[in-house]
Image (cartoon, rainbow, N blue to C red):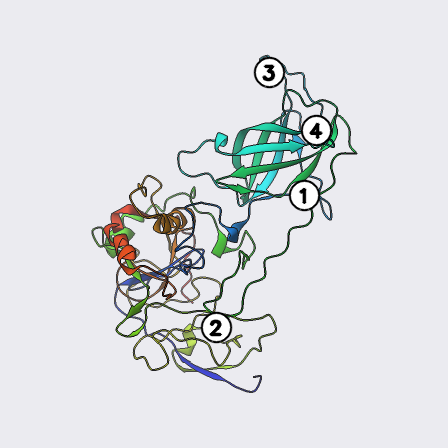
């Protein structure tokens, strides 16, 4: 409705508590954590895998082609790759090929052997490939290099289709020339592009909302710890438990911050801020008149309507101590924290907290994390997250803090 407008109050800065959004989304400035990964469509009944449908394991290819971006890992030569490669050390002269992938992340303690590889030739024979190395590409941390060792029985077969598998998730298959380029099996049919449903609480069906290098999708599992991490965590509370501020129903209203998925054609509307408009981007926003409101249309107090913008865009506290968490501060669950005692559904959330962390996004109660309400949540199950305390988290290193 192009001529309509929406009036939204902006939350007034409060005290020293902080709320977090989990990333892929998080928040805190009174110390509330906001967790944007927690619709049951995504986590509550999912298997405990690090690679979900929302982040499909993908081998990179050349432009408009199924041919792999690949090099020989010792000589850096491009294809075709010889079945064997003379080396100056050792006796194992089987060729190693380096491929490149996105959304490939090993769990803490896992080795490259957790990834398996396979090649199929023109006769549809399959050859297991040993994965010897997996690691982030320097300067392109969203991308991983994967070194596979060719099978002993692979000769001058020409093109093969190569794929890799991790935690039950299998990548696309890419074309690689062994001995010579050409021939080989036909390409796999193109995978269909996930299409999200529309409406309140709709499933995204694996559609990744932002590109891999966007802050909402940033893998911070190996990022350095902020030098002031201990003080920052202590200011929120070392012994305070994590509090899931979402679930089924609380006090007769949906518990959490609901969301709605709209089409790309959704009209943008001007926003009339009734208070604190200087703390928000002016819009206009693609907010439909039917956008669900936190607590329901008759609720009092916090009544958020969330539109995703770049994290941490303003200062919202009168306390400027360096030991107070600023908006946009990213906190992660420590890699050594044992999640094995939690349910499979909660292990999904906890893996996300290790890989993507949570972002301080709002004023609120200490260690509160926000999520979407849904009747499929199990509130008793969610309550077990309260056994995790502030001491189990650490702050990811921050850069320049912007206050305007």
Q: Residue 347 in the image: x percent, y percent?
A: 36, 47
Q: Quadrant of residue 339?
A: top left
Label 1, label 2: how many angstroms apart (C-alpha)? 38 Å
Find disc 4 in the rendering and name its residue: 77
In the visual, does 365 lie left or right of 224?
left
Q: Earlier in the sequence, mark 4 or mark 3?
A: 4
**Which residue does the numbered mark 3 point to in the structure image?**
92
Q: Is residue 137 visible?
A: no
Q: Label 4 crowding class (10 Å Cα cut-off): few <14, some 14-19, many 20+?
A: few
Q: Secondary structure at mark 1?
A: loop
Q: Earlier in the sequence, mark 4 or mark 1?
A: 1
Image marks 4 and 1: residues in contact by CB distance under 8 Å: no
The answer to whether 241 is drawn above or below residue 223 in the figure is below
Q: Is residue 383 visible?
A: yes
Q: Is residue 30 above or below residue 381?
A: below
Q: CA distance from mark 2 to mark 4?
A: 49 Å
Q: Nearer the viewer, mark 4 or mark 1?
A: 1
Name the mark on residue 61: 1
State which tag comes first along the sequence, 3 or 1.
1
Circle 2 sits on which residue? 281
Residue at (59, 58) in percent of width and height = 194
Q: CA distance from mark 2 to mark 3?
A: 59 Å
Q: Position of residue 348 (x, y in %)?
A: 39, 49
- CB under 8 Å between callouts 1 and 2? no
Residue ID at (67%, 19%): 85
């Amino acid at each position: 409705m192009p001529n309509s407008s929406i009036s939204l109050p902006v939350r007034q800065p409060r005290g020293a508590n902080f709320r977090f959004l989990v990333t892929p989304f998080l928040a805190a400035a009174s110390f509330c954590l906001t967790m944007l990964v927690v619709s049951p469509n995504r986590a509550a009944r999912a298997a405990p895998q690090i690679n979900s449908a929302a982040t499909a394991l993908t081998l990179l290819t050349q432009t408009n082609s199924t041919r792999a971006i690949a090099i020989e890992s010792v000589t850096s030569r491009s294809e075709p790759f010889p079945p064997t490669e003379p080396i100056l050390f050792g006796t194992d002269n089987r060729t190693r090929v380096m491929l490149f992938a996105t959304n490939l992340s090993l769990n803490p303690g896992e080795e490259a052997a957790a990834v398996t590889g396979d090649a199929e030739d023109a006769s549809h024979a399959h050859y297991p490939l040993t994965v010897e190395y997996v690691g982030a590409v320097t300067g392109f941390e969203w991308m991983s290099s994967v070194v596979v060792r060719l099978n002993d029985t692979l000769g001058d077969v020409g093109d093969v289709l190569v794929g890799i598998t991790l935690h039950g998730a299998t990548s696309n298959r890419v074309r690689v020339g062994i001995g010579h380029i050409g021939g080989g099996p036909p390409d796999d049919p193109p995978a269909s592009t996930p299409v999200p449903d529309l409406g309140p609480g709709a499933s995204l069906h694996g559609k990744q909302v932002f590109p891999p290098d966007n802050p909402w999708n940033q893998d911070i599992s190996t990022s350095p710890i902020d030098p002031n991490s201990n003080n920052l965590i202590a200011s929120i509370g070392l012994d305070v438990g994590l509090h899931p501020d979402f679930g089924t129903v609380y006090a007769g209203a949906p518990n959490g911050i609901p969301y709605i998925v709209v089409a790309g054609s959704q009209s943008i509307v001007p926003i009339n801020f009734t208070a604190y408009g200087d703390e928000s981007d002016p819009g206009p926003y693609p907010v439909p008149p039917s956008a669900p409101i936190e607590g329901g249309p008759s609720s009092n107090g916090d009544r958020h309507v969330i539109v995703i913008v770049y994290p941490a865009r303003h200062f919202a506290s009168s306390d400027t101590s360096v030991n107070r968490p600023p908006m946009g501060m990213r906190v992660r669950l420590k890699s050594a924290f044992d999640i094995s005692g939690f349910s499979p559904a909660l292990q999904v959330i906890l893996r996300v907290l290790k890989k993507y962390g949570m972002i301080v996004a709002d004023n609120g109660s200490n260690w509160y994390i926000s999520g979407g309400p849904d009747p499929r949540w199990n509130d008793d199950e969610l309550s077990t997250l309260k056994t995790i305390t502030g001491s189990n988290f650490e702050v990811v290193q921050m850069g320049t803090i912007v206050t305007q």
